[in-house]
Amino acid sequence: MFTGIITAIGEVRSIAPASADRDSRFIIAVPQPNPVWADLQTIALGASICCSGCCLTVIAAQQDAFTVDVSNETLSKTTLSQWVPGTKVNLERALRMGDELGGHIVSGHVDGLARVLSSTQEHGSTRWRFAVPPDLAGFIAAKGSVALNGVSLTVNEVDGAQFGVNIIPHTEQMTNFGTLKPGESVNLEIDMLARYVARLTHYRPTAQD
């Protein structure tokens, strides 16, 4: 589990395509020094790291980088299929009991892609608008939470399958929102509470149940 509070902007160092006996392999570098990531070389194998909204499992770690395998399913459902060496990646280590919950509960399970419609300067911040697939639009509510590329954000307004958020300068500097452009896609995770409310609302037991 994660909180949507990004603690480093990593960079894809290399990508090895899938082979007959393994999935695609990504090596992601983490800029140093960074107190949150200072013990990267000793990170437990099998640990989870949220990479631009995708929960990925560490299979190896170096002093300034870690390696993950990415399945075809993940590539088909996320922006990871578009990553190349040099791509900037929002990083967050897994939440530990007792950590401050500064954002909202994020699972790292991407529900779909949101497309950037526009970014407009508004006083000191930037107002971003996104379009989402129709089947996900109902899960997004004004003043609710959403994770975009792993960043916990509050929804300003909703208009059909479009919604807006405000990004303050600090968030822009600490995430890959600083390089995002209209027309690009981001990994979208809807609020976990909305997911279960929708399930309870629409589920109807049958005789077989």
Image: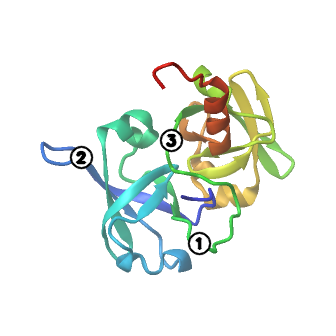
Vertical placement of residue 129 versus 45, above or below:
above
Give coordinates of residue 77: x percent, y percent: 43, 34
Q: Which residue is drawn at 43% across and 61% down?
A: 48
For the image, the number of numbered tags is 3
Task: Say which amino acid is labelled 1.
Answer: Met
Q: Which of marks 1 and 2 is in front?
A: 1
Give coordinates of residue 208: x percent, y percent: 45, 21
Q: Which residue is drawn at 51% across and 50% down?
A: 108
Q: Can residue 92 be seen in this view?
A: yes
Vertical placement of residue 194 versus 60, above or below:
above
Q: Quadrant of residue 5?
A: bottom right
- Residue matched to label 1: 97
- Residue matched to label 3: 110
Q: Nearer the viewer, mark 1 or mark 3?
A: 1
Q: Which residue is drawn at 21% across and 44% down?
A: 18
Circle 2 residues within 10 Å: few <14, some 14–19, many ≥20:
some
- Residue matched to label 2: 23
Label located before the other in sequence (2 or 3): 2
Report the colour scheme. Answer: rainbow
Task: Say which amino acid is labelled 2.
Answer: Asp
Q: Which residue is drawn at 49% across and 75% down?
A: 37
Q: Is residue 111 left or right of residue 201?
A: left
Circle 1 residues within 10 Å: few <14, some 14–19, many ≥20:
few
Label located before the other in sequence (1 or 3): 1
Q: In this view, does 66 lie to the left or right of 19?
A: right
Which sits in the foreground, 163 or 199?
199
Give the distance between the C-alpha atoms of the residues marked 1 and 3, in whole angstroms: 23 Å
